[in-house]
Amino acid sequence: MSEFDDIRPYNDSEVPAVIARLIASPEFIDLLLSRRAPLLAKVFPWLMRPLLRRALSKAAKNIHTVADLQRYLTVSLKALIDKTTDGFSFSGAEKLDPTKSYLFLSNHRDIAMDPAMVNLALIESGMDTLRIAIGDNLLSKPFASDLMRVNRSFIVKRNISGRREKLTELKKLSGYIRHSIAQEGVSIWIAQREGRAKDGEDRTETALLKMLALSKDKEQSFAQAIGELSIVPVSISYEYDPCDVDKGRELFAKQNGREYIKDEFEDLDTIQKGLVGYKGRVHVAFGQAFNYELGSEIGSEINSQLNEQLENADKLAAAIDQQVYSQYKLFPSNIIAYQMLGKTDGLERVKQLWPDCDWFDVEAVFNSQLNAAPRKYRDIMTQSYAAPVSNYLQATQGC
């Protein structure tokens, strides 16, 4: 038994049995029906369940490995993106070496779409797909764990109370990430913080970076251990957030001193909204990898700078944030939100990113998005859309 068996994704040999379990799961089938055909599921559940199982069994006949499943899901993902966005783009992939594995560390706005968009950009760049870190708070049901782990997700255990037990699990997680990248040559996606950045402020948690170093050899420094992982900062930007009202509601509660308690299926509802909701344009930007090998290739001065950035978790977090902010693709929705808050510093500079934009039209569209939300959430939502502009301006000051 491998030390990582309880958190790793499923292997090819396990795929048929896992898919069979999913199709046989009453909870999974009822969940799919409630999302796809809620009225028919209520009126004719006895009819709809076997029909759905038959359709899933037919699709499963051609799925025998993880790669088979991902090819099937990629076709569905592309169709979904065509339906729910006004275009998907990416940049910076030319800096990646297809023969190497990386730790893609991204800002976090959407539970399911963030890693899916990064994966799609890699696929379209001719690179292999990656393994995805997912918190066990999203895996309360056995079918949810099966569903995610069969699609190359591995588990981050968060629901642990004991200090010693928590440290043990963090070391295991760190070891698995290092094993995947350094030993198996499979890249990893992980968010820069626990939970989505609901306020639009993308900040890398130093605790996450310290966790990554827990698996280092005793003689290694923090810089050497982190350098082996080849961290690539990634900026994911959505023109419109399908979950902006939900994020506004949660932030409003917290700002007013109330504990926000999620409903039982709120995370699943959030995932669904993120998948099927309108997102406008979406962009994924890959940054420059943090590793020693890169530094030796591009010169001693930059190599020295990279070594300094890798010196400790605080410096590395700041360097990652710098890349995330500066390469973040600002959309007109972000810029108009910044303007609506009465901010003028750098406004004309960011407006030049969209020289042909009709700003009156953008403001009208943005206001229609806000007007769909309760009035008490609108200021919070506007601030969340504007936050990336402030961060971009600070990161690119003097550029």
Image: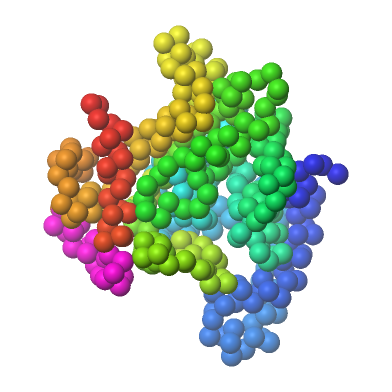
- Side of 67 relative to 255 (left or right): right
Residue at image position (63%, 52%) is: 158
The answer to whether residue 66 shows anywhere in this view is: no
Q: Farthest top residue?
A: 300
Residue at image position (66%, 33%) is: 214
How far from the left and from the top, in percent, is residue 201?
Answer: 37, 47
How far from the left and from the top, in percent, is residue 317?
Answer: 46, 33
- Answer whether residue 377 is magenta in the image: yes
Q: Farthest right residue?
A: 1
**Rendered image quadrant of residue 179:** top right
Residue at image position (31%, 33%) is: 395
**Which quadrant does the C terminus fall into?**
top left
- Side of 335 relative to 30 (left or right): left
Colour scheme in the image?
rainbow
**Rendered image quadrant of residue 101:** top right
* Stretch in magenta: 359-378
**Which quadrant does the N terminus fall into?**
top right
How far from the left and from the top, in percent, is residue 57?
Answer: 72, 68
- As displayed, is residue 256 above or below residue 115? below
Q: Main secondary structure of the magenta part?
A: helix
How far from the left and from the top, in percent, is residue 324?
Answer: 40, 37
- Answer whether residue 276 is magenta in the image: no
- As displayed, is residue 288 above or below residue 114? above
Residue at image position (61%, 74%) is: 31
